[in-house]
Image (cartoon, rainbow, N blue to C red):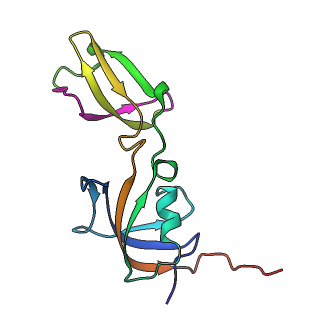
Amino acid sequence: MNMIERNSRVTLYYRLGSTNELVLEDNFDDEPLSVQLGQGGMAEGLELSLIGLSAGDVQTIDIGPDLAFGHVDETLFRVLPRADFDPGIELEPGLIIEFANEAGDTLPGTILHFDDDEVHVDLNHPLAGQTVRYSVKIVAVDNASVEPKILH
């Protein structure tokens, strides 16, 4: 049976949430996710925690901010003009909306508070600074594309 290695292709079901049982993402009722480890597609702490697991394994993994979504960066708090927001969007504290950066990439931003003139936004990942909990069920492990280990 294949065990997960650093560069394995892994197919899995996963649930991402906080340690207080708030669920943010869950694909257990959908198709499993297939991801190549080591490519930045998953949080580093999750990838490291999967190493050594095999198809059929079920695991609950708590990961701190250092290996999950980072710590809160105070430089990512912004005050934006209310006029920059579509008047059809009903703003409320805690609402997460997508923003585009200068490079055209999108990132989530959380509305902190607002008035008629300004909107205060936190552009840190919504889970920054938190310990997160993943529940995973490994469906398949493919090590065919993993480079062989060279022993010296």
- Where, quadrant-wise, is the C terminus in this rendering? bottom right
Q: How many marks?
A: 0
The picture places residue 45, in percent across and down from the top left corner, at: 50, 59
| 95 in the magenta segment | yes
Task: Using the image, determine if residue 56 lies above or below residue 84.
Answer: below
Q: Quadrant of residue 108?
A: top left
Q: Residue at x 53, y 65 (%)?
A: 48
The picture places residue 112, in percent across and down from the top left corner, at: 29, 26
Q: Residue at x 25, y 22 (%)?
A: 113
Q: Main secondary structure of the magenta part?
A: loop
Return the residue found at the far front. 20
Position of residue 96 in the picture relative to residue 43 (left or right): left
Task: Using the image, determine if residue 127 lies above or below residue 148.
Answer: above
| 104 in the magenta segment | no
Q: Nearer the viewer, residue 15 or 11?
A: 15
Q: Nearer the viewer, residue 88 or 26?
A: 26
Task: Using the image, determine if residue 117 lies above or below residue 64.
Answer: above
Q: Residue at x 47, y 27 (%)?
A: 74
Q: Nearer the viewer, residue 20 or 87?
A: 20
Q: Quadrant of residue 93?
A: top left
Return the residue found at the far bottom. 1
Task: Using the image, determine if residue 146 lies above or below residue 72.
Answer: below
Return the residue found at the far top. 117
Position of residue 94 in the picture relative to residue 14 (left or right): left
